[in-house]
Amino acid sequence: MTTQDVIDIMVWGSVAALLLAGLVALAAVLIRFGLVSLSERFAVGLRAALLPLAALTALIATLSSLYLSEEASFIPCELCWFQRIAMYPLAAILIIAVLTRDKCVWRYALPISLVGLGVSIYHYWIQVRPDDAPAACSVGVPCSVRYVDQLGFVSIPWMAGSAFLLIAVLLVVERLSRGGTSDEATPSTDEPTTTGTKVSPY
């Protein structure tokens, strides 16, 4: 498999990620307003898949960026590094959250993904309008350089942005799907209870 073949897979994967983000968001809205109903079993299974999918997306994005720099020899620009700074920790944070079943992960993973998305949008804007690039982007590799230019609109920041967007949507939908459920761990119901007697929580 050539480098171009791998890049083509990344390009279509980013398009699929953007479409999936839209479908997940649309489905969440339809379910939220009662326009679509799901069986309890299917809904629970779907909810359980959201966080692992977000972790998988971050991991694939991280490995893809490493492939582009280490294998394809694309030197990251200033804004590319900022997007990496956001994406790399996300992969670790989300994988750990899946393994530990951390219900609070959205509190710190969502802001990181939104910041990364903002940088990606700004980077893409500079590629579209190079004259708007700040002075910092002219040092080393210009931020306006397009190592990847597929389908007339897909570039590296576009691919990164689609990953950040999908992660953000999955985190928001996962949190909303729990409704008013607290993020804190719920106490076990296996412990014996005493009827009619006040028991000190300590």
Image (spheres, rainbow, N blue to C red):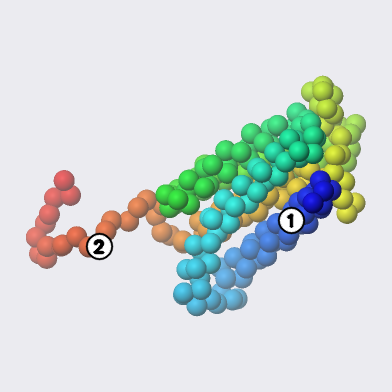
Judge the density around disc 2: few (<14), some (14-19), many (≥20) Cα neighbours within 10 Å.
Answer: few
Q: Residue at x 59, y 52 (%)?
A: 56
Residue farthest along the left direction in this orientation: 197
- Report the disc number at residue 72: none
Earlier in the chain: of badge 1 and badge 2, it is 1
Q: Are marks 1 and 2 in contact (CB under 8 Å)?
A: no
Which residue occupies the foreground of this view, 133 or 97? Answer: 97
Give the residue number, with chain letter if any, for mark 2.
189
Which residue occupies the foreground of this view, 60 or 77? Answer: 60
Q: Is residue 122 visible?
A: no
Q: Which callout, 1 or 2, points to the residue nearer the camera?
A: 1
Q: Is residue 104 visible?
A: yes
Residue at disc 2, secondary structure: loop
Residue at disc 1, secondary structure: helix
Question: Which quadrant of the figure has residue 191?
Answer: bottom left
Q: Residue at x 49, y 62 (%)?
A: 48
Question: Does 134 sit left or right of 179 as displayed?
Answer: right
Judge the density around disc 1: few (<14), some (14-19), many (≥20) Cα neighbours within 10 Å.
Answer: some
> What's the residue type where badge 1 is placed?
Gly
**Count of all numbered marks drawn on residues in the image:** 2
Q: Up-down: is 174 above or below 87?
A: below
Q: Residue at x 67, y 36 (%)?
A: 84
Give the residue number, with chain letter if any, for mark 1.
13
Q: Up-down: is 39 above or below 44?
A: below
Give the Cα distance between marks 1 and 2. Answer: 43 Å
Q: Residue at x 73, y 59 (%)?
A: 16
Q: Position of residue 160 (x, y in %)?
A: 72, 45
Question: Does 137 sit left or right of 197 as displayed?
Answer: right
Q: Up-down: is 93 above or below 73?
A: below
> What's the residue type where badge 2 is placed?
Thr
Q: Position of residue 22 (x, y in %)?
A: 69, 61
Question: Does 123 sit left or right of 28 as displayed?
Answer: right
